[in-house]
Image (cartoon, rainbow, N blue to C red):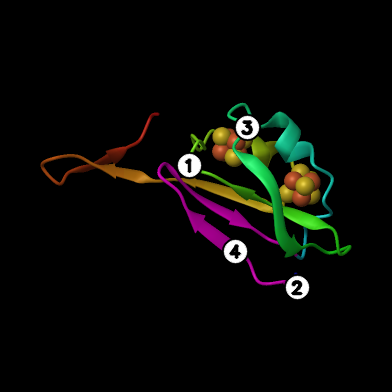
Amino acid sequence: MSKEYKSKTQELKRALFTLFPGLCKGCGLCIEKCPKKSLSWSDTLGVYGTPTVKANDECTACGICQEVCPDCAIRVERMKKVDNEGNKSENTG
Ligand code: SF4
Ligand code: SF4
C-alpha cells in the first residue's frame, strides 16, 4: 500500500473511471450510492491514508459516484462503443 497523488484511470467495458487519490477521504459514499455495486475499496491510499475506491466492469458510466463524491475525487467518462462496422456511437447501456 502506498500513498499516491497521481490520478488513476481504469479502462472499463463502458467507462473510463478516474480516481484522484489526493482528493479522496475514504468516506465510502460512492460505494454506498453506486446502483451497480461496482465500487469497492482499493489498496491505493487517499489524502488521509485511508483506502480509496476502484470500479469493476459492472459500471454503466451512470455518473452517480461522480455526483455524490463530496470531494470531486471521481471522474467518469462514457466509453464510445464501436459497432461491427467500426462506427463509433454513444454507449447508452
Ligand atoms: S458511474 Fe455509476 S455504475 Fe459506475 S461506479 Fe459510478 S455510480 Fe457505479
Ligand atoms: S471517491 Fe469520494 S465519495 Fe468515494 S470514498 Fe472517496 S471521497 Fe468518498
Q: Of circles 4 and 2, which is in front?
A: 2
Q: Nearer the N terminus, badge 3 or badge 4?
A: 4
Q: Where is residue 6 shown, x and y percent of the image?
A: 66, 72
Q: Nearer the N terminus, badge 2 or badge 1?
A: 2
Q: Is residue 47 left or right of residue 5?
A: right
Residue assigned mark 2: 2
Residue assigned mark 1: 57
Q: Is residue 19 visible?
A: yes
Label 2 SS: loop
Q: Is residue 63 visible?
A: no
Point out the stretch of residues depicted in magenta.
Answer: 3-21
Q: Do the residues bearing badges 2 and 3 touch, measured as CB atoms within 8 Å?
A: no
Cα distance between the residues tagged 4 and 1? 16 Å
| Mark 1 Cα shell of 10 Å, populated few (<14), some (14-19), many (≥20) | some
Q: Nearer the N terminus, badge 4 or badge 2?
A: 2
Q: Where is residue 5 shown, x and y percent of the image?
A: 72, 71
The residue type indicated by label 3 comes to Lys
| Magenta span includes 40 | no
Quarter holding residue 11: bottom left
Q: Nearer the N terminus, badge 2 or badge 3?
A: 2
Q: Residue furthest left?
A: 85
Q: Is residue 81 above or below residue 48?
A: above
Which residue is found at the position 84% from the left and 54% from the top?
Answer: 25
Which residue is found at the position 84% from the left and 45% from the top?
Answer: 27
Cα distance between the residues tagged 3 and 1? 10 Å
Say whether mark 3 is within 8 Å of ligand 1.
Answer: yes
| Magenta span includes 20 | yes
Cα distance between the residues tagged 2 and 3? 25 Å
Residue assigned mark 4: 8
Which residue is found at the position 50% from the left and 38% from the top?
Answer: 61
